[in-house]
């Protein structure tokens, strides 16, 4: 069986086509369309019509690519940039009506649950009690669990793009005052979640997302061209030392640093502050960089449980109200009811 998944993020629409033989999603083709939706969001959170049409074109191209590769689907979802938009329902309906693809938004806690599943499958049971961090453009997901799915998930409005827009755009490079304000926001939002992770005492901690991958490369891990099976770790001390280096440079010059891509250069500093503060407050001195995340989690859950859970999400996601501003931790039992 060949499956496909489409991930609409704050910066990029990504397609993964994978074979599912033996219960493992083995990628056979990937593609991406860089839209930078978060840069075009209006002050009130609306995504403008021009960007919606660009999204429609990207999803249509992704669906046609998946079809050419012989995949069913695609399983298509959008993360925080669409989930938080006041015109979310109109966006989802436009994509569905013009492409035939039922694009869904998942609650942040469900995103964390699926990312945890992908990380657990990659790391294996030997990793024991597992803590997870994932920095997206609009939100930070934190999870902990001892089994296949997490016991605890939180989704916090601490995405790298969101915080860059709020704290770091007025001056480039930012002022020390702006950085202090950013740190205060992150510490305040993370306080209760970090206390829970410290109390749980994970044996292993993992970080996923392009933000963490690029920060790890900046701090000296192997480049991506070496493949996913190379072990990569990000150490808190090294990440902390990288923050002044990033803060001293304007965004265009950060793109010259190892691992920092031009499209993510502006938000790399906010991502570093979120990552370092999360590690510090949770007491984690290092995290393993995990190549599997939410896309693999979606594929794994589809393989293991069939398509009924995704069909239920697809049926009701247009009618779900957008989350309130500043939405944060939701108990896992509530997240589970969403699917």
Image (cartoon, rainbow, N blue to C red):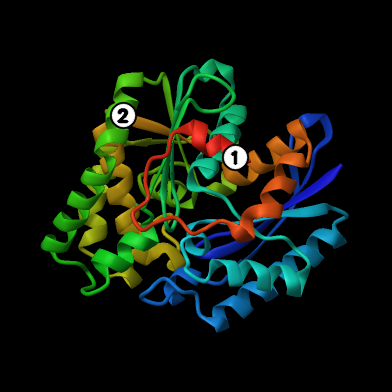
Question: Toward the viewer: 122 or 131?
Answer: 131
Mark 1 Cα within 10 Å, few/some/many (few <14, many 20+)? some
Q: Residue, x 67% and y 49% (percent of image)?
A: 313
Name the quadrant of the N terminus.
Answer: top right
Q: Residue, x 50% and y 36% (percent of image)?
A: 334
> SS at mark 2?
loop
| In the depicted structure, whether residue 237 falls above or below residue 99 | above
- Residue highlighted by disc 1: 228
Q: How many marks?
A: 2
Task: Please indicate whether residue 91 sits to the left or right of residue 162 in the image.
Answer: right
Q: Cα distance, mark 2 to mark 1? A: 23 Å
Q: Nearer the viewer, mark 2 or mark 1?
A: 2
Q: Quadrant of residue 91?
A: bottom right
Kindly give the residue lying farthest to the bottom in the view shown.
50
Question: Toward the viewer: 149 or 4?
Answer: 149
Task: Please indicate whether residue 158 sits to the left or right of residue 99 in the image.
Answer: left
Task: Please indicate whether residue 142 sits to the left or right of residue 61 in the image.
Answer: left
- Residue highlighted by disc 2: 284
Residue 257 seen in this snapshot = no
């Amino acid at each position: 069986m060949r499956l496909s998944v489409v991930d609409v993020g704050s910066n990029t629409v990504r397609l993964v086509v994978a074979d599912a033989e033996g219960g493992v999603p083995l990628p056979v083709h990937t593609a991406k369309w860089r839209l930078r939706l978060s840069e075009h969001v209006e002050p009130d959170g609306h995504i403008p019509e021009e960007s919606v049409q660009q999204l429609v074109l990207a999803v249509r191209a992704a669906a046609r690519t998946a079809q050419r590769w012989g995949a069913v689907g695609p399983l298509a979802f959008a993360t925080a940039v669409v989930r938080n938009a006041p015109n979310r329902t109109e966006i989802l309906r436009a994509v569905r009506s013009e492409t035939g693809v039922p694009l869904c938004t998942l609650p942040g806690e469900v995103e964390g649950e699926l990312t945890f599943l992908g990380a657990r499958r990659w790391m294996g049971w030997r990793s024991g009690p597992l803590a997870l961090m994932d920095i997206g453009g609009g939100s930070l997901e934190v999870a902990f669990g001892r089994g296949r799915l997490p016991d605890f998930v939180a989704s916090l409005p601490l995405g790298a793009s969101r915080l860059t827009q709020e704290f770091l755009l007025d001056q480039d490079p930012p002022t020390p005052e702006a950085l202090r304000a950013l740190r205060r926001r992150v510490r305040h939002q993370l306080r209760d979640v970090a206390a829970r992770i410290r109390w749980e005492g994970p044996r292993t901690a993992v970080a996923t997302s392009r933000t963490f991958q690029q920060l790890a490369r900046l701090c000296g891990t192997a480049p991506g061209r070496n493949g996913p099976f190379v072990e990569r770790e990000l150490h808190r001390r090294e990440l902390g030392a990288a923050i002044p280096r990033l803060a001293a440079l304007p965004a265009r010059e950060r793109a010259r640093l190892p691992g920092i891509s031009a499209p993510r250069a502006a938000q790399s500093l906010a991502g570093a502050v979120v990552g370092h503060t999360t590690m510090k407050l949770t007491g984690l001195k290092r995290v393993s960089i995990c190549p599997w995340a939410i896309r693999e989690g979606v594929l794994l859950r589809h393989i293991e449980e069939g398509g009924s859970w995704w069909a239920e999400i697809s049926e009701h996601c247009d009618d779900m109200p957008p989350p309130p501003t500043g939405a944060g931790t939701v108990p896992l039992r509530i997240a589970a009811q969403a699917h």
